[in-house]
Image (cartoon, helix red, strand yellow):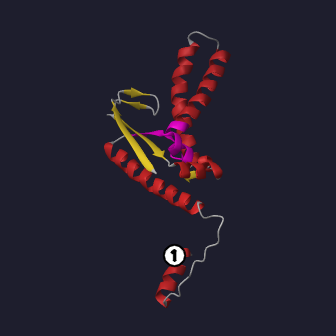
Amino acid sequence: MNLLFERKQKPGIVTLVPLQFGSGPLFTLWAKAEFTEDEYALLQKYRFNDALLIADDWLTMLQRSFRTSLIVGFVVWWLLFAFFSWAITTTLTMVAVVALTAVYYNELREHIYVRDLVHGRTFRCFSIVELVQKEDYLKGITAYLRQVLETAKHWDGREVVPIPTLTPQEAKALVAKVG
């Protein structure tokens, strides 16, 4: 398995996704995992494409996306109201807000599915530091996925895992950690 990165930088003068006005450059990081034939066969066999590698607080991201869409929707409403009736303007604005919420959510989400790494995904970063952190983060979850695939090779067998006896101090530390 290999992990591919492609880095780009754009001027951040005005971008709607994510909503940003003149606050410096916007960095993008494209990431894709290359799988061997055996690894790809395991992905297909166990239907890993929809497996969630990293979950974020989806409700907070949805709220953030909705708030951003409302700001844009307010501007759209005033522009449309100059040409259409109140009912048509409000209906079109509501449709625009729902559509923009979906677009913003997809662009800003931190959820990372296996399919994101299979097909490649672009991540937006507001600084070079954030981009480097995202690269490191992606390396870690790709290593995790690699280990899951290695484990999947042996799922049909039986494994004996010896559990050693711990000293009293180690046992207390383990119980405190689990509890």
Question: Along the line of sight, which residue is nearer the eye, 151 or 132?
Answer: 151
Question: Along the line of sight, which residue is nearer the eye, 21 or 139?
Answer: 139
Where is mark 1, residue-wise?
A: 177
Q: SS for tag 1?
A: helix
> How many numbered dots are placed on residues in this image?
1
Q: Position of residue 99 (x, y in %)?
A: 60, 29
Q: Position of residue 145 (x, y in %)?
A: 52, 55
Residue 109 included in the magenta stretch of the image? yes
Question: Along the line of sight, which residue is nearer the eye, 55 or 122?
Answer: 122
Extent of the magenta region = 106-125
Q: Quadrant of the C terminus?
A: bottom right
Pick out the residue farthest to the bottom. 168
Image point (35%, 30%), residue name: 12
Q: Is residue 133 left or right of residue 100?
A: left
Which amino acid type corresponds to the residue marked 1 in the rendered image? Lys
Q: Position of residue 140 (x, y in %)?
A: 44, 56
Q: Is any part of residue 55 visible from this angle?
A: no
Pick out the residue farthest to the top. 83
Relative vertical location of residue 160 with respect to residue 154 in this rendering, above or below: below
Q: Position of residue 132 (x, y in %)?
A: 34, 48
Relative vertical location of residue 25 with respect to residue 142 in this rendering, above or below: above
Q: Is any part of residue 170 visible from this angle?
A: yes
